[in-house]
Structure formats: structure tokens, C-alpha cells
Amino acid sequence: MRYAICNETFLDWPFERAFDCARECGYTGLEIAPFTIDSDARRISPSRRTEVRKQAEAAGLEVIGLHWLLAKTQGFHLTSPEAAIRGATAEYLRELARLCRDLGGSILVFGSPQQRNLLPGVSRDEGMKCAAEVFSSVIPDLDALGVTLAVEPLAPAEGNFLNTAAEGRRLVEMVAHRRCRLHLDCKAMSSEPQPIVDILKRHRDILVHFHANDPNQQGPGFGRLDFVPILGALREIGYAGWVSVEVFDYAPGAERLARDSIDYLRRCEERLPSRS
């Protein structure tokens, strides 16, 4: 397994310290929340992009992509009934794709529940059409940049749109392009009635990225979720992407979250049956 960690785990640590800590813990990949650089990606200069990429490389990390794409932004909404807002959202996604490429990444994880929630009067079907329109309009740019948009289903507690892997799949199939695929998150999948292992197997053909976390909002191993069968399923389906640790509750502290999460995942991996 290739293990990555989301950089906001380290809160307000300087990037050099955070990146060095991640590598010392054993991670080789880094997933970046754009707002940790600037709340508006358009303000991130070419020199700053180069600097962050070199900081990651100096620590021995590969920037794999971006997530929390629209967090702390204003004026963007994926399912807005207003064409101008959808157009602005699409244009901002193009900028995020360029930022991702400039940092060395290739994945855009689209979660951002507040900027995709269905507004009053907008049906689920209408929301799907709006989202597919926005994503489809940026596909040419994604393809040219070599960046893939990963649709992230989130639990109902997070928002009211794209709450299951099946709904994420429906949107991916509406866009119908190799640059739009599915992202799955353990905390979110835990809200579904189907076992996580079954969800992973059902959507193996479009799975491009994966977040490891516990339903208690901390890292893997900090709660009751058993990752042995989960990692086993990822191996069985031939998943070749990153296992990226993402947490929401930072109470244990950044270093403990980073170190204990990867240590737990490695112990789980060691318990998997050996390959024949």
C-alpha cells in the first residue's frame, strides 16, 4: 500500500516541519487542502506553487492532489440553479486543476459539502444535472493537464447531496469520461447499510482514490473500525491508488494522529494473507 496524509492534519505547523514529520512517520504521499496555502487559489503565485512543491520533494514526499477544494471560498456552488454561479464554479475548478498540476498532483477530490448541498427548491435530479454540467465543462482542461476529478460521497450528517457511493457512481456515469472517477471515504461509507468491503468491490471499476479514517472522525486505529478486511478488499480489487489518511478531530495531536494511523495500517497490512 502507498500511504499519504492530508496536510491540514498538521494544523498551523510550518510546511517544512509538517512535511518532515509526515515523511518521518513513513508517508510518501501528501494531499493538500488549498486553503492551507491561501483561501483563494487564484492568489497563489507561480513562485509560491513552486516553493510548496519543492518543500514536499525535499521532505521525500509526492504531492498526490488536492481536497477540500471549495472550503473557505465564496461565490461557488456546484448545484446552484443560477448558471452564472455554476460557470464561476467551473472556472475555479479549472484553476484548482492548474494548481494541482503545478504542485505535482493528479487528483482533485471533490467533497466540499457546503458548496454542493441542494438549495431550497432544487430536486436531487436537478442537482445531478447541474453537477454533471459543471464537471463536464472542465473535462477538457482536466484531460489536458492530466488531472482526474474524484467525486466524493459524504454521509448525510455532512450534507444533503451525494450521500452514497451509488449516487457518486451515478454522477460519474453522467459525466462519462475517464477524468471523472469515484473517491471513497471510510467515515462516509460507514453511514451506509452495506459493508464497506462490499461497497469497495461494487465500485472497483471506477475507484480512483481512497481516504482512511474512522467514523469517530479521527485516524484509522483510533476507533472501532477494523481495517484488515478493508485493506484486504483493496488488495483483492487491485486498487493501485493511494491510501490517504484524513482526520477531522485533531484532539490527539497532529504527530500522534500521523504516526499512530500509519503504524496501525501497516499492522493491518501485515495481517493480510500472503499472496500466493
Image (cartoon, grey):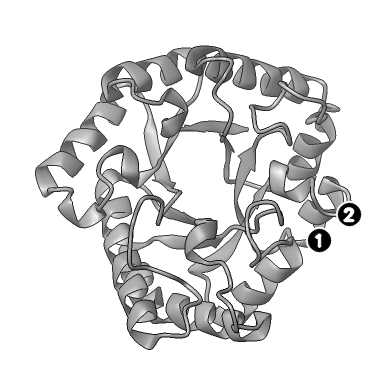
Q: Where is residue 189 in the image (x, y as percent from the top left)?
A: 75, 49
Quadrant of image for the N terminus: top right
Instruction: Measuring from the top left, give residue 81's x and y in whole percent.
Output: 47, 85
Instruction: Report the Cα–Cα distance between label 1 and label 2.
Output: 10 Å
Closest to the camera, between mark 1 and mark 2, is 2
Image side of residue 268 versus residue 8, left or right: right
| Quarter of the image with the C terminus in it | top right
Q: Nearer the viewer, residue 274 or 108?
A: 108
Q: Where is 94 relative to 193, above or below?
A: below
Q: Residue 194 carries which label?
A: 2
Q: Which amino acid does label 1 sit on?
A: Arg
191 or 271, which lies in front?
Answer: 191
Residue 29 visible in the snapshot = no
Does residue 27 appear to the left or right of 184 in the view shown? left
Residue 248 percent across, percent down from the top left? 57, 34
Q: Quadrant of residue 193?
A: bottom right
Residue drawn where x is 58% and y is 78% of the image: 120
- Dot 1 or dot 2: first in sequence order is 2
Q: To which quarter of the image does residue 37 belong?
A: top left
Residue shown at the point (74%, 25%) measured from the top left: 269
Determine whether label 1 and label 2 are within 8 Å by CB: yes
Instruction: Work out whether residue 232 or residue 174 is closer to the camera in this orientation and state it.
Output: 174
Is there any visible trace of residue 35 in the rendered image?
A: yes
Q: Name the residue under label 1.
A: 202
Q: What element carries label 2?
A: loop
Foreground residue, 156 or 213? 156
The residue drawn where x is 32% and y is 38% is 36
Residue lying at 58% horizontally and 80% vertically, measured from the top left = 127
Q: In this picture, is 239 found above or below 76?
A: above
Q: Which secondary structure lies at badge 1?
A: helix
